Structures are given as C-alpha cells and as structure tokens.
Image: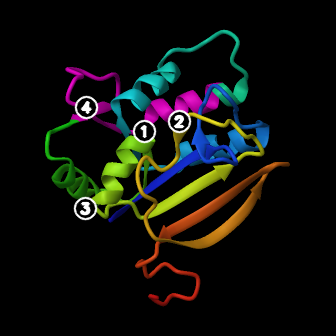
Amino acid sequence: MARLVFGMNQSLDGYVDHLAFAPGPTLFHHFVEEARRQAGSVYGRRMYEVMRYWDDDHPEWDEEEHAFAAAWRAQPKWVVSRSLKSVGPNARLVGNDLEVAIRELKAERDGEIEVAGPNLAHSLTELGLIDEYRIYLHPVVLGHGKPFFAGPRPPLRLITQDLMGEDVIRLTYVPASSPDSPDGHHR
C-alpha cells in the first residue's frame, strides 16, 4: 500500500512561495533523488500548472535541473481538477470522488506518493488520507502568502528532524494517531 506524503518548502512564518525562495544545491539534489524514487505525485490544478515547467527543456538548466526534469517526467501524475479537460504526458485526471480515487490509488500502488499543494493537502487531510508531512523550513520570513496548512493544522507527532544543506531543516510529522510515532505507541 502506498503512503501519501505532503512536503513543501516553507518560510519561518509558515508560508510556501516558490518565487520568494528556492532550495540550494544540496536540497535540490535531495528533491531530485526523491522524485526518482517516488511512486508518483498527486496535484491540484494550480500546482500541476506550476510544475508543467518541467515538461520542456530550458537551455539555461544545469545538470541537476535536467535530472529533476527527467525524474519528474518519468513518474506518474494524478491531477485533481474540475476545470481541466486534459493533462500532459504521464498524467491522468482524477474524477469527482476524490476520496474513492485516492483510496484506490493508495491500495493499488506501493511506495511514496507525493501530495503537491496546500489546498489539495488540506482536502486529503480532512479525509484522513495523508500519512506524512514534511516541512522544509527555510530561514526566510515572508510576512504573507499561501500557508503550508490551508486549514486547521491536524494533530501531528514529530518523528524526525534533519539538517538539509547549510540552513534548511526538514521536519517530518505523522498524524498524532499514527502507529509510526518514534516509540511505536499511540498516545
């Protein structure tokens, strides 16, 4: 059974904005490796449209950017949208019943499936379908923007923290009721 993982870069004050700050070389390499090993990604419409950038090669890309694009293109993608009529290569539209579609997806796949976008993550959190949250905390304060959690924060339990490069900390959480707590017990 697949595990749904929601992870994004976040400012110290809780916002996500790919234009305001970006991962350094070490963290970007980490994302390349994650994209290579993921069983796929589930996107909301807006995040999918942002990520379509990786569908076309750009002459200014370095080796790591080409590696990320290749990994992203190779993985299956599921796009949750009522307005899109079609999606790009290696992508499929998710029907109207989000819960049924994602439960089926988790049941038929193995490995990690990335959840991309705070609004989609909020919907999946409300359905109890997110297995893990990864916050890549950057030393940046934005003061405004789109929050990592698009609704009330679910009860979470910290399971790991890692320094990613020189200045980013990855905080990994599971739902508080999950058996994946550090000591293996429910609380």
- Element type where label 4 sits in the image: loop
Which residue bears the numbered disc 1? 75
Point out which mark residue 107 bears. Answer: 3
Q: Are marks 1 and 3 in contact (CB under 8 Å)?
A: no
The residue type indicated by label 2 comes to Ala
* SS at badge 1: loop
Q: Which residue is mark 2?
A: 71
Kind of residue sitting beneath label 3: Ala
**Bounds of the magenta span?**
66-93
Real-space CA distance between mark 2 and mark 1, rounded to the nearest whole angstrom: 6 Å
Q: Residue furthest top?
A: 59
Q: In the visual, does 3 lie left or right of 128?
A: right
- For the residues marked 4 and 2, what is the alpha-carbon distance in whole angstroms? 23 Å
Label for residue 81?
4
Percent x, y for residue 46? 39, 28
Q: Is residue 155 above or below residue 25?
A: below
